[in-house]
Image (tube, rainbow, N blue to C red):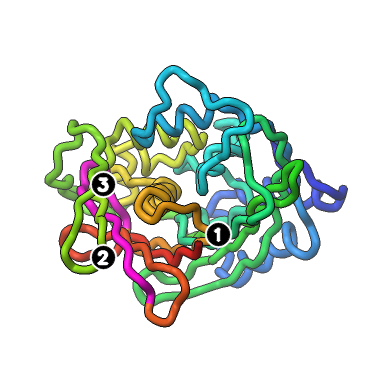
């Protein structure tokens, strides 16, 4: 199902956006400022885009199986609450393969070329206490472009940071406000990727792992996690995410320069929310999160929490055994 604009002007902007996002970086040498301005011109202002979908139990069951939280042969019945973050497997991209970017990503709200290399950077979710998402609900997703901002760093050069907000509204009212941030960098120059890039020293044949360990450092339960390529493939399928860094090792290593297939940012986010519910015994009212460093299939890492100084919530941290912080979040609830 394609994005359905609420106004005719928005429909024109979507079509215009399709035209500029498919242009070749060799023919379009926009600066980050020009790319951001063009994105705002096509999608900004008061334009909103709407889709409707039935939240079916089969999709939820498949996600639970992927997360190793199986329901057996029982499909979640109508009325079953959708856990925090699990809405990410609904309202998935609808583009035909011929409309995808070279790296497999969909182009909805993407910056124009040459800023076509998309990475999930973080975001904020806020759940409404008086409404929730449930299996069997017919829900409306309302999307708008919040901002498109040019940035520059000494390590990666120019980029465009894009913020999009999605509201999910059901029969009981608005259940969730989901603001997502993406970073768009210039398409990678394959000639600069080392030809002899080594793979990670991990066993990618091993199954996924999720084990809780009690610690003595005051942080309580730590969850040890490891994702297999099989689990990453299944999550890509559930979210209809064709981004090649999550399943195509040849592309990931030879083009993107990663040592292995990359764990999805949204999958890490769901893992953090599941950890919160399991360990702290309640559903969060909100989460603000930031992706900081990639994780790869077969890598063992841990999820832990600690009381934030001077803050009402807790900080949830995803980190590798060497101390590298991969994702960090502030959870309220």
Earlier residue among tags 2 and 1: 2
- Relative to 142, say whether 162 is above or below: below
Which stretch appears magenta? 294-308
Q: Which residue is mark 1?
A: 285
Q: Are marks 1 and 3 in contact (CB under 8 Å)?
A: no
The residue under the point 53% across, 38% down is: 89
Farthest residue toward the bottom?
Answer: 310
Question: Where's residue 157, x and y in %?
Answer: 42, 71
Earlier residue among tags 1 and 3: 3
Q: What SS does tag 2 mark?
A: loop
Would you call the spot at circle 2 few (<14 residues within 10 Å), some (14-19), or many (20 or more)? few
Q: Is residue 332 visible?
A: yes
In magenta stretch: residue 6: no
Question: Where's residue 325, x and y in %?
Answer: 28, 64
Query: How many tags in the picture?
Result: 3
Q: Which residue is mark 2?
A: 219
């Amino acid at each position: 199902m394609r994005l359905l604009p609420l106004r005719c002007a928005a429909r024109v902007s979507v079509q215009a956006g399709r035209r500029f996002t498919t242009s070749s970086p060799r023919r379009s040498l926009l600066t980050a400022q020009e790319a951001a301005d063009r994105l705002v011109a096509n999608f900004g202002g008061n334009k909103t885009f709407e889709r409707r979908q039935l939240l079916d139990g089969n999709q939820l069951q498949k996600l639970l199986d992927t997360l190793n939280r199986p329901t057996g042969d029982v499909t979640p019945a109508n009325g079953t609450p959708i856990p925090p973050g699990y809405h990410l497997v609904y309202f998935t991209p609808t583009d035909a393969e011929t409309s995808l970017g070279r790296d497999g990503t969909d182009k909805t709200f993407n910056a124009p070329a040459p800023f076509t290399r998309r990475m999930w950077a973080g975001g904020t979710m806020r759940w409404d206490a008086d409404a929730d998402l449930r299996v069997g609900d017919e829900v409306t997703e309302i999307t708008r472009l919040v901002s498109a901002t040019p940035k520059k760093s000494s390590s990666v050069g120019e980029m465009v940071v894009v913020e999009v907000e999605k509201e999910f509204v059901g029969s009981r009212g608005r259940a969730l406000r989901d603001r997502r941030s993406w970073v768009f960098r210039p398409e990678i120059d394959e000639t600069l990727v080392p030809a002899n890039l080594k793979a990670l020293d991990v066993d990618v044949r091993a199954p996924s792992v999720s084990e809780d360990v009690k610690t003595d450092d005051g942080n309580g339960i730590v969850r040890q996690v490891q994702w297999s390529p099989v689990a990453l493939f299944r999550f890509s399928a559930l979210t209809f995410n064709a981004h090649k860094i999550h399943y195509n090792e040849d592309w990931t290593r030879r083009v993107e320069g990663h040592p292995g297939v990359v764990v999805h940012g949204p999958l890490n986010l769901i893992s953090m929310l599941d950890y919160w519910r399991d360990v702290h015994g309640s559903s969060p009212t909100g989460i603000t999160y930031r992706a900081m460093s990639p994780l790869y299939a077969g890598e063992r890492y841990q999820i832990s929490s600690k009381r934030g100084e001077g803050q009402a919530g807790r900080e949830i941290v995803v980190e590798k055994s060497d101390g590298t912080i991969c994702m960090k979040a502030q959870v309220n609830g």
